[in-house]
Amino acid sequence: SVSLVAGYGAFLGSPIAQPGDLIAEYTGEIISEEEADRRGRLYDKQACSYLFNLDKDRCVDARQYGGKIRS
């Protein structure tokens, strides 16, 4: 879905039970920051990216191996 506040994302249809509850796992291929930069340039040209930073050295790329939450 699209939010007028934050753009694309996953949104719940009802409130969560408690703050901090797990909603879903963002799954995909764990890649280096350098590989994410390389892929990011390609994805930007295609206007479609599923990169998510884990920390300063690693990212998750859900483009090919992602689960439901990436949609």
Image (cartoon, rainbow, N blue to C red):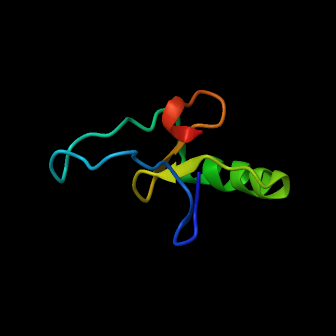
Q: Is residue 43 above or below residue 30?
A: below
User: Residue 66 location in percent, x, y?
Assistant: 56, 31
User: Residue 15 location in percent, x, y?
Assistant: 27, 50
Q: How many marks?
A: 0
Horizontal side, residue 22 vs residue 4: left or right: left
Q: Residue furthest bottom?
A: 5
The front one of 12 and 39 is: 12
The front one of 55 and 14 is: 14
* Residue located at (20% from left, 44% from top): 21
* Residue located at (77% from left, 58% from top): 44
Horizontal side, residue 12 vs residue 10: left or right: left
* Residue located at (84% from left, 57% from top): 45
User: Residue 7 location in percent, x, y?
Assistant: 59, 64
The front one of 34 and 14 is: 14
Q: Residue furthest front?
A: 14
The front one of 25 and 6 is: 6
Q: Is residue 10 above or below residue 37?
A: above
Q: Residue furthest left?
A: 18
* Residue located at (61% from left, 46% from top): 50
User: Residue 71 location in percent, x, y?
Assistant: 59, 39
